[in-house]
Amino acid sequence: MSAVLRAQALGKKYKRRCALTGCTLDIPAGHVTGLVGPNGAGKSTLLNLAAGMLTPTSGTIEVCGGRPGSGPAQLAKVGFVAQDTPTYPALTVADHLQLGARLNPGWDGALARHRIERLGLDPARPAGKLSGGQRAQLALTLGIAKRPELLMLDEPVAALDPLARREFLHDLMDAVAEHGLSVVLSSHLIADLERVCDHLVVLVDSKVQVAGEVEELLAVHHRLSGPRRDLSTLPANQHVISASHTDRQTTLLIRTDEAILDPAWTVGRLSLEDLVLAYLSRPAEAEADHRPALEVIR
Ligand SMILES: Nc1ncnc2c1ncn2[C@@H]1O[C@H](COP(=O)(O)OP(=O)(O)OP(=O)(O)O)[C@@H](O)[C@H]1O
């Protein structure tokens, strides 16, 4: 499986402050990947490095087989809508589309015009006079109409109302289906990610806590509940992600490739949100020594 984004020990420092440290990850081509993590995990920094808006202070990053921002051909392959959906306040909506056409060799003018029309954006209106959500829609239109190989979106739907959010995600899925576009989407809205992403990366403190195809991840994670149990008695192939105990009962969230044979457990499936939350609350060092993320004893 080819990687559309590959980072090796990637780091970014601002003066003495580390925004990203030792980040190693592969994002496969041909997927819509959800990038999730707590505030300050380094998601925006990673996406800005991938877009060539920042340069690394350590490690390497490769996007669509090249160094980010390394020339016109590389720039044409990658679309990026930054977190604050930047537009030029004095330029009109139509000016933005013209600029898009001038700057991007693969520009799809019909798609851009059609989308702007459907959104009801006045082509003559300066971007500075649009609402936050309308500006986000304009920036997203430019990103899609550029027809990149990889489109990276940093919290693209945060400013959109629920209906606009659904329509946008729908448009994105259409672009993926029609043009085989790869997408990396950072968001805190797990229900949205659940709707559009088939691949997931959970980043905490610059490190990948879990990554993989959503269906596979859901298939190997389980919720176990049963009589109170000492975790050291579990089979070695069951990795505990989180654990909570009452006097008589234990509830675990585990990862295992094997069948769960112990009849004392009631086994339940997880939602994507359960899975993400369990990994978000996992201390970074827990992964190395297979300690549970969270052990709550009541
Ligand atoms: N320009 C900057 N100067 C100094 N520190 C920065 C700068 N940009 C980001 N940081 C720091 O780098 C870390 C990672 O920030 P980043 O914006 O990448 O996180 P994030 O995962 O995108 O967070 P959020 O979910 O809040 O958007 C944070 O601790 C942040 O304070």
Image (cartoon, rainbow, N blue to C red):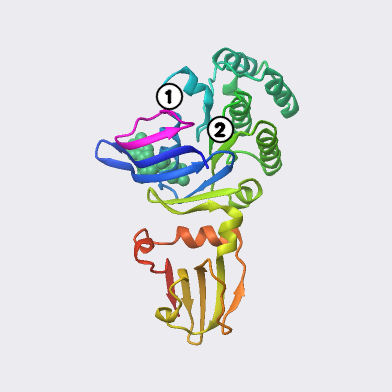
Alpha-carbon distance for marks 2 and 1? Answer: 14 Å
Is residue 253 shown in magenta?
no
Residue at 71% x, 42% y: name it.
Answer: 163
Q: Which residue is mark 1?
A: 69
Quadrant of the rendered structure where residue 173 is?
top right
Q: Ligand 1 within 8 A of label 2's CB? A: no
Q: Nearer the viewer, residue 38 or 77?
A: 77
Q: Position of residue 67 (x, y in %)?
A: 40, 28
Is 227 situated above or below 2? below
Residue type at numbered disc 1: Gly
Q: Residues within 10 Å of mark 2 (few under 14, many from 20)?
A: many
Quadrant of the rendered structure where residue 103 is?
top right
Ligand 1 resides in the quarter of the picture at top left
Residue type at numbered disc 2: Leu
Q: Ligand 1 within 8 A of label 1's CB? A: no
Quick one: SS at disc 2?
strand
Q: Residues within 10 Å of mark 1 (few under 14, many from 20)?
A: many
Is 92 situated above or below 223? above
Q: Position of residue 217 (x, y in %)?
A: 56, 58
Q: Position of residue 296 (x, y in %)?
A: 44, 74
Label annotation for residue 38: none
Residue at 66% x, 20% y: name it.
Answer: 108
Quick one: SS at disc 1?
loop
Lateral position of residue 246 relative to residue 189, left or right: left
Quadrant of the rendered structure where residue 148 is?
top right
- Magenta stretch bounds: 52-68
Q: Which residue is mark 2?
A: 151
Residue most extreme to the front:
1
Upstream in sequence: badge 2 or badge 1: 1
